[in-house]
Image (tube, coloured by chain):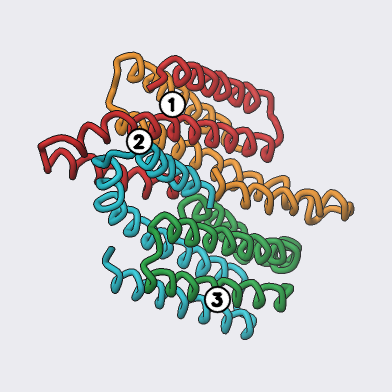
Chain colours: A red, B cyan, C green, D orange
Amino acid sequence: MDREDTLRRLKNVEGHVRGIQRMVENDAYCIDLIRQIQAVQAALGVVSENILHDHLHSCLITAVRGEDPEERERVLKEITEVYSMASKV
Amino acid sequence: MDREDTLRRLKNVEGHVRGIQRMVENDAYCIDLIRQIQAVQAALGVVSENILHDHLHSCLITAVRGEDPEERERVLKEITEVYSMASKV
Amino acid sequence: MDREDTLRRLKNVEGHVRGIQRMVENDAYCIDLIRQIQAVQAALGVVSENILHDHLHSCLITAVRGEDPEERERVLKEITEVYSMASKV
Amino acid sequence: MDREDTLRRLKNVEGHVRGIQRMVENDAYCIDLIRQIQAVQAALGVVSENILHDHLHSCLITAVRGEDPEERERVLKEITEVYSMASKV
């Protein structure tokens, strides 16, 4: 995984969330708060896409080419699970 | 892919969508329409999860174990793309 | 509600779902199936947005201006509920 | 808005995001990272639902009962917009 890029994006998300806290303290307009929260959710979506991309190019390839059918099955099942969850958050 | 199960689910979705059309014609309450539409979206989500499950256990394994790096890259990229799209529909 | 537009869109969705059934019968590529299913989910999202738009401009206004606090509360609660569900399907 | 509850939830989200950063630094398993990111997205979804709930019970009621049709239209349009966005993040 490109760890530095992921950490940088998560730092930005953390700063964004603190910014929303200040907006709440300053009685910002509700809809502006919701829009900022949705922007953070979208930014987190990009982070998880990047992590999945790296996962497919490393752990997945190792598991699929490996000798252990249970390990392979576990890795494939996890991908289906996070795909399913992606549309529910 | 378990083609019969997928076809059965898509038939149900088609019937559900026709049912919503009748609700519209009969002036059903807006919120009830929205709830039915959301139920159809969720049912379609299950269909795509099942298809992804089967894809991972067939095409993906073939591509990852195969000799063609471009084909492997294409298959891995597609998975990231449908994952990304899953959270946007 | 603009009933004709909604019915037309739902007819299109129904045809799209039938098209996906034919793709399944013809052994279409899994990822192409998933993309078409996601396109249908997005089209249904537009339908529900349009219905919500009309609901806000009719039932909601009536309920908020009306004399019945329980009816108003019910209508406001429904909107929060479909908003919550929108991100989960 | 129940500002204290919202601030408390956003503080929790901020801590959660910092925890994910530590997981990245400690080379946590990719899928565990994705699951934690999805949990944060879901927690943010609850925050925005609560804010929308309060918005409907305050600003919306004021705008719908008020004398200014442009203001009312603006408020109704915003609700449709955040509803639309909710399914895309």
The residue drawn where x is 75% and y is 52% is: D77
Same chain for the residues at labels 1 and 3, yes or no? no
Q: What is the secondary structure assignment of the residue under circle 2?
A: helix
- Indicate the amino acid at tag 1: Asn
Quarter of the image containing the C terminus of chain D?
top right
Q: Does residue A5 lie above or below A83 as drawn?
A: above
Quarter of the image containing the N terminus of chain D?
top right
| Residue placed under numbered mark 3 in the picture | C15
- Label placed on residue D12: 1
Q: Does residue B74 lie above or below A9 as drawn?
A: below
- Indicate the amino acid at tag 2: Pro
Callout 2: chain: B
How packed mark 2 is, by other alpha carbons closer than 10 Å (few <14, some 14-19, many 20 or more), is few
Q: Where is residue B15 shown, x and y percent of the image?
A: 46, 80
Q: Are marks 2 and 1 in contact (CB under 8 Å)?
A: no
Q: Please tell me whether mark 1 or mark 3 is closer to you in this view.
A: 3
